[in-house]
Amino acid sequence: MTETTTAGTEFPFAPLPPADAIEHLKRLMADRPMTKTTMPYGGDVWIVHRNQAARTILADRRFVREPFRTGERIVPFFVPFPDFLRTTLQFEDPPQHTKLRKLVQKAISPRRVRDMRASAVAFANELIDGMIARGGVRNLITEYSVPLPIEMLSSLLGVPSADREKFERWSSSTMAVAGKSEDEVATDLAELSAYMTDLIAQRREEPRDDLLSALAHAREKDETLTDAEILPIAFILIVGGFDNTANFLTTGVMSLLHSDEQRELFLTDPDGLAPTAAEEVLRHGGFALGGPVGGGGGLVPFVATEDVVVDGQLIAKGEAVSIDPGSANHDPEAIEDPGRFDITRKDNPHLMLSHGLHHCLGAPLARMEMQVGLAEIFKRIPTLRLAGEPVVRRDVLTQPMTDLPIAW
Amino acid sequence: MPKVFYIQPDGSETVVEAVAGDSVMQTAVRNGVSGIVGQCGGSLSCATCHVFLAEENADDFAPVSEDEDEMLDCAATEREDNSRLSCQLVLADGQEVRVTVPEAQL
């Protein structure tokens, strides 16, 4: 029999044109639910491809992160996992995870985020006003995608307006968007820690209606939180809240600029289509940019506390397991016509924000910022166009884009 | 076999035959009922499976726990007296349950 497709079942695989990558993933998922892979750091990990298998694992408490938190195990990953991230909520297991998460949850809940929406719209428009006034070719990343989430998170945490410039510098540096050296990043991180510690002390004295005040006073409800516990919460929000959201917002703008058909559709009703468009960008945005896509992604791994069989595959006690959202988001068993970029897609069970106990705590905020960010810029500048190729830093954890020239 | 009637905000209704021991949220997610997200998989940490429970079923389930109560305050659609998180509504054999899905979960 003659083979009619070049799609293989090897994993990880080198970047391929998006349609070929999706075909490759399809074949891979038909072949097996997961693949054992040796990571550049930390050894072997099962990378889970299928959507349902991924959900099963993410909802199973027999998979934990303790060995990574304690340092007993190195996190199997593409880059060395920064130490400061290993002290955050995402590396905790119940019951400590439950306690910390509950404290942050209320401040960042769908309800609270809904109340922040008007100020996000106002700030997005301020940023757009600035870009229009300056004219010419603008950098979408530094003038729009990064400042919007920074403003929202500063407001949520309770960073005073006067300090936001400093906060932005430290935080951006932490996330390597600024392209600084390791020493500079360490210095900025130390300054940020000192600043946040002072701010927490101030909020202990004089609480306001913000997250740091709420966390600083949680001890009154017999849920004692020390500075050492509050700081990592602030850091994980900074990590997830700035860099990732900025990246997704940029990807959203770019993917719409790459598809005339979907952009024209979006322009007919930006506010109405923003919610489903944001979900589709999360699911498929990286594939909708037109460039080659590789296979080898993975969320933060877990370790099996006992032998567990998932989708017919034994994951032995002590083995690490990680979910590949790029693959799970293109599983034809879960997503209809997964290769199509469709901003009207309603049934969209993507796993880009994870699922289960460790699903993204900032998901409501990230979604709102993406929806507002996409809708406002296309409403104000419907003739938006790309004026060059993006600059991407591939040497750091979140692979941030640092420059995207746009014009209109 | 339990049966769940999901009523959408536009009045349309989906009936699903469920498995005893599954929650109303799990049943919805497994059967592709729209409007119930269940992002945290039932660990009481997302409030994205909010439903309004029909009056006739009010006494069929354990009352709202303290944790559920706190999360209901966080839901995207304003809570009402009959608001529940559907992950906490665990179905028993023979039960027939009606829930209305709110306008927004996210």
Image (cartoon, coloured by chain):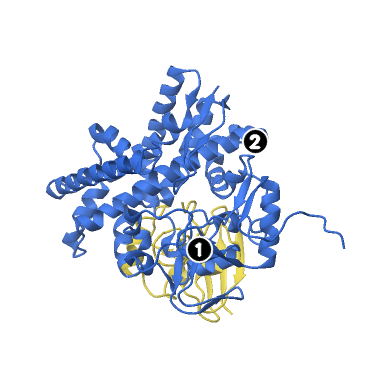
Chain colours: A blue, B yellow
| Residue at the spot of label 2 | A259
Residue A143 in which image quadrant: top left
Task: In the rendered view, tell whether residue A301 sits above or below residue A348.
Answer: below
Residue A273, percent across and down? 56, 40
Secondary element at tag 2: loop
In this view of the protein, which residue sits in the foreground, A7 or B65? A7
Left or right: A291 with respect to A351? right
The quarter of the displayed image where residue A358 is located: bottom left
Sequence order check, earlier mark of 1 and 2: 2
The three-letter amino acid code for the residue at tag 1 is: Ser
Of B95 and A275, nearer the camera is A275
Disc 1 secondary structure class? strand
| Whether residue A330 can be seen here | yes
* Callout 1 crowding tier (Cα within 10 Å): few <14, some 14–19, many ≥20: many
Q: Amino acid at mark 2?
A: Ser
Callout 1: chain: A
Image side of residue A94 versus residue A132, left or right: left
The reply to whether the C-beta atoms of the residues labelled 1 and 2 are less than 8 Å apart is no
Closer-to-camera residue (B61/A317): A317
> Residue beneath label 1, please?
A322
Please tell me whether residue B44 is drawn above or below residue A368 in the rendered image: below
The relative height of residue A110 versus residue A66 in the rendered view (above or below) is: above
Q: Which residue is found at the position 17% from the left and 45% from the top?
A: A198
Mark on residue B8? none
Residue B42 placement (x, y as % from top left): 45, 67
In the image, which is nearer the foreground, mark 1 or mark 2? 1
